[in-house]
Each structure stands twice: as structure tokens, then as C-alpha cells.
Amino acid sequence: MNVYAITDVGQHRKVNQDVVFTSLKPVGRLKNLFLVADGMGGHKAGGFASQYCVEQVIKYVEASKEKTAIAVLREAIRCTNLDLQKSSRSDISLEGMGTTLVAATIEDETLFVGNVGDSRLYLFHGGDCKQITKDHSLVEEMMGEGKIKKGSSDYKSNKH
């Protein structure tokens, strides 16, 4: 298996708040672990949020007693979210912080994925590229409802 992780600061920001973790070795009961977190750039402490998120997910995965890969990921994401909220409430400099997260593991040729926000996981295989996750965003919701078309630059309604 080959693993590639790419982040890009984009054209509108000066700081890249992306944090990536990849391990082809076991992490807790998982045979491998892949994480991408992107701090919400327009929000306070986005860089802290993404780094903290990745560190906490790893910690919870290592400590998890859950039996299935998806349960391990679900528990780690849930607990990390609670920790982020608690930190945000206890430190005014972290108030309102946020991050996206994609967490994945592969077990017996099955890919298990958890995601929050608009960071994406793609699968490249045999020259094909497939987007695995769906964004949790207003734009994705509008596309799902048929209000806008994918690739539309003006995001106008399709009903004209």
C-alpha cells in the first residue's frame, strides 16, 4: 500500500492550519491510521484546534477498548470533539476554535472512514480517483438538494 497526504494553504490564507498523520503500523487496536485535520482559518485558534484534534484522536484510538474499527473511530472522534468544546469554553483565546477531520483505517481490504467538515478523502486505484467522503457544508447540501450544480462558479439555482 502507498499512502500520500497533501495539504495546500490555498490562495486566500497565509498560514496552513492542516495537520496530517499517517501510520502504516498499528495504533491501538487499529492496523493503521490516517488523519487529516484542517483548522478553520477564519476562526480563532484553528491551527491549535487541528493539532490538538489529531493528538487527541491518536490518544483515544490507542486507549480504546472498542472491538470494531468503526467503533474505535467513532469513539475517538466523539471524545475529541468533547475535549475541543471543553478547551474552547475554558480558555478565552480558544473560544470559537474549530477544525475539520478525516479519520480512516484499512482492515482486511475494507476502508473505514469518519469525517467532519469539508476536508476530503480520495481513493486512487488503477489510475482512477474517487472522492470517498462528502463535505459537511452548505454548498454540498445545496448540491444534494439540486439547488446548484457541481462545478458551478456562481452557485445560482438550477431552476431558472
Image: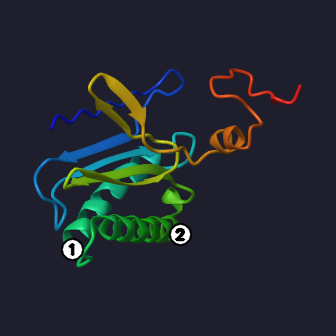
Label 1: few (<14), some (14–19) or many (≥20) C-alpha neighbours in 10 Å: some
- Extreme-right residue of the structure: 160
Q: Nearer the viewer, residue 126 or 3?
A: 126
Residue 48 position, x and y percent, is 39, 51
Say above or below: 86 vs 58: below
Location of residue 154 by image quarter: top right
Task: Please state which amino acid type lies under the numbered disc 1.
Answer: Ala
Label 2: few (<14), some (14–19) or many (≥20) C-alpha neighbours in 10 Å: some
Is residue 26 rendered to the left or right of residue 157? left
Is residue 137 rendered to the left or right of residue 97? right
- Secondary structure under tag 2 reads helix
Q: Nearer the viewer, residue 148 or 16?
A: 148
Residue 133 position, x and y percent, is 46, 44
- Extreme-bottom residue of the structure: 65
Going from N to C along the chain, the mark reached first, 1 or 2, is: 1
Q: Residue at x 52, y 43 (%)?
A: 118
Location of residue 84 by image quarter: bottom left
Q: Mark 2 — residue?
A: 89
Q: Nearer the viewer, mark 1 or mark 2?
A: 1
Q: Residue at x 52, y 40 (%)?
A: 41
Is residue 10 rendered to the left or right of residue 29? right
Q: Quadrant of the N terminus?
A: top left
Q: Quadrant of the C terminus?
A: top right
Q: Residue at x 68, y 37 (%)?
A: 143
Task: Please state which amino acid type lies under the numbered disc 2.
Answer: Arg
Residue 86 position, x and y percent, is 47, 71
Residue 39 position, x and y percent, is 45, 45
The scheme the figure's colours follow is: rainbow
Q: Which mark is residue 63?
A: 1
- Secondary structure under tag 1 reads helix
Q: CA distance from mark 1 to mark 2?
A: 25 Å
Q: Residue at x 29, y 42 (%)?
A: 20
